[in-house]
Image (cartoon, rainbow, N blue to C red):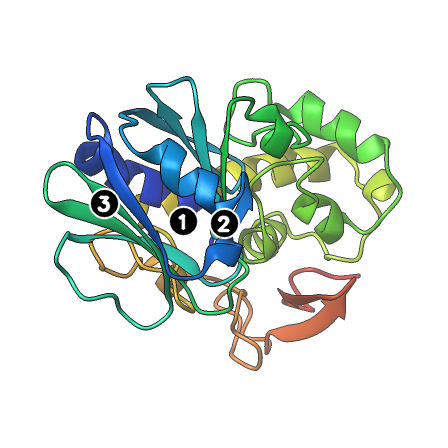
Amino acid sequence: MPELPEVETIKNGLIPEVVGRRFLKANLLWPGQVRQPSPEEFRRDIVGQTVEGIRRRGKYLIFDLSGRLKLILHLKMTGCLLIRPSDAEPEPHTRAILYLDNSTSIHFLDQRKFGAMWLVQNENEVVGGLGIEPLDHAFSVDALRETLSKHNIPVKPLLCDQAIIAGIGNMYADEALFEARIHPEKKTRKLTAKESERLYNAICHVLVEGIARCGASVSTYQQPDGEPGFAHLFFQVAHRRGERCYRCDTPIERIALRGRGTYFCPKCQKA
């Protein structure tokens, strides 16, 4: 699933290609991708809208449009956005094509059809329930410690709860917990002050490094120019079950934790 570094990378790749451009047409190859308004209204209302800016909120992309509308996209598990010439043939699993006024288009690919688009005036209808951004100034050691103390659940599910912290997902939660030497099942209220500080630093570090490495292409993720990311080449535990820990040579293990595949080193991250 594209997580914060992947969505941030997509945003950074779209901005120079899309900001200032005007939408000419929307071709909805799978209308079910539009959640709001109706597909017919979406096709009609997006025409003539100029993209004034693109932002990220959690794992969502928000296009600020000229007519006070917001185009919001969520890539879910298998979505990606590609910049293509307007006359390019759609690739397999292309669900929507948004045509721009410079002979290019945005192709929304989504193998599993979980991705979604909204065209709304009030973005809070879609993203209003998200938690704190982990790379914002408001996210601090004290803020994380306070958040951890409010819950008594395993730390891994808390990191993945978008209503608590927005943007972290499975991969980067596993990486942060490994870097902080914390077992993913440890209850949040049992984390010491030092562990909380290590976890805060680890979260910030793995996310910043993930962005610098253009995201992780472990599945269908691509950058808007079609190039893969390479953050996964530096993963310490995520998606490495059975491989040796780079730190201690112990085999990496995988468990299911609240329905999520969770990777960790049983020696470096003792229960």
Residue 209, compared with residue 226, is above or below; it is above
What's the residue at 62%, 47% (across, down)? Answer: 180
Left or right for 120, reference 94: right
- The residue nearer to you, when weighing 76 against 135, is 76
At numbered mark 2, what does the secondary structure look like: helix, strand or loop?
loop
| Residue 209: percent from left, percent from top | 39, 44
Percent from the top left, x then y, of residue 39? 48, 47
Instruction: Quickly name the residue at label 3.
Output: 99
Residue under label 1? 6
Contact, CB < 8 Å: mark 3 with mark 1?
no
- Residue occupied by mark 2: 3
Secondary structure, mark 3, is strand
User: As displayed, is residue 6 above or below residue 119?
Assistant: below
Q: Nearer the viewer, mark 3 or mark 1?
A: 3
Q: Residues within 10 Å of mark 1 (few under 14, many from 20)?
A: many
Residue at 79%, 62% in the rendered image: 258
Which residue is nearer to you in this view: 244 or 38? 38
3D distance between C-alphas at marks 2 and 3 = 26 Å
Q: Name the residue: 29% across, 37% down.
A: 12
Q: Quadrant of the C terminus?
A: bottom right
Image location of residue 137, percent across then percent down: 53, 18
Q: Earlier in the sequence, mark 2 or mark 3?
A: 2
User: The residue under label 3 is which amino acid type?
Assistant: Tyr
The amino acid beneath tag 1 is Glu
Mark 3 Cα shell of 10 Å, populated few (<14), some (14-19), many (≥20): many
The amino acid type found where label 2 is placed reads: Glu
Looking at the image, is 176 positioned above or below residue 11?
below
